[in-house]
Image (cartoon, rainbow, N blue to C red):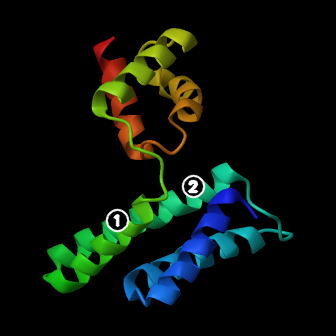
Amino acid sequence: MGALKDQLQSDLTAAMKAQDELVRATLRMVLTAIGNEEVAGASARALTGDEELKVVAREAKKRREAAEAFTSGGAAERAARELAEERVIAAYLPAQLSDDELSALVAEAITESGASGAQAMGQVMKVVNPKVAGRAEGGRVAAAVRAALAGS
């Protein structure tokens, strides 16, 4: 079991003792998602720390998207619950990169790969993704790369 999963498990126990329904339900959802990922595929396996982080980030993204859907559908109360769950999950994610930090990493990746033009986006993404590692969503990274390549 990875360190993140251990932390989630101990925080779940604490939330159960404190009778904190929101944290308890949210952490159970996240732990279930990690468990499902562990048994997905041909054989069960333990996830690495990075894989656990990806699952947690994916769960946070699901909450944000659900909140947007509920807000546009007029279900403000359900949207508020989804956003509250997303805040609980966000506590387990690394700090997100600012726009300036992301731009600097993208510029560095472009220089490193020697890429130019929109057709080189894949090359740059291969270099920048490991550097970003869960600190920015893929869509945001892709948009920054696209903008940087269009400007070069």
In the image, is residue 10 above or below residue 53? below
Question: Which residue lies at the image location 58% right of the left edge and 69% below the top edge?
Answer: 8
Query: What's the residue type where badge 1 is placed?
Result: Arg
Q: Secondary structure at mark 1?
A: helix
Q: Amino acid at mark 2?
A: Lys
Q: Nearer the viewer, residue 22 or 66?
A: 22
Check disc 2 and report the residue beneath it: 54
Distance (Cα) linking label 2 and label 1: 16 Å
The reply to whether residue 75 is in sight is: no
Residue sitting at the far right: 43
The residue lying at 78 percent from left, 68 percent from top is: 41
Judging from the image, what secondary structure is the residue with disc 2 in? helix
In this rendering, the answer to whether 86 lies above or below 119 is: below
Q: Count all numbered tags in the image, as a single digit.
A: 2
Q: Position of residue 17 (x, y in %)?
A: 51, 88
Q: Residue at x 31, y 19 (%)?
A: 150
- Residue 152's label in the rendered image is none
Left or right? Give the position of 117 relative to 35.
left
Give the x, y percent position of residue 73.
Answer: 17, 80
Q: Image quarter for residue 129?
A: top right
Residue situated in front as seen by the camera: 49 or 115: 49
- In the rendered image, residue 140, in percent from the top left (x then y), is placed at 36, 41
Image coords of residue 80 (percent x, y): 22, 77
Q: Residues within 10 Å of mark 2 (few under 14, many from 20)?
A: some
- Residue 142, by quadrant, is top left
Query: Quadrant of the image for the N terminus?
Result: bottom right
* Left or right for 29, reference 151: right
Give the residue drawn at x 41%, y 16%.
107
Who comes first in sequence, dot 2 or dot 1? Answer: 2
Mark toward the viewer: 2 or 1: 1
Label 1 Cα neighbours within 10 Å, binned few <14 / some 14-19 / many ≥20: some
Q: Which mark is residue 87?
A: 1
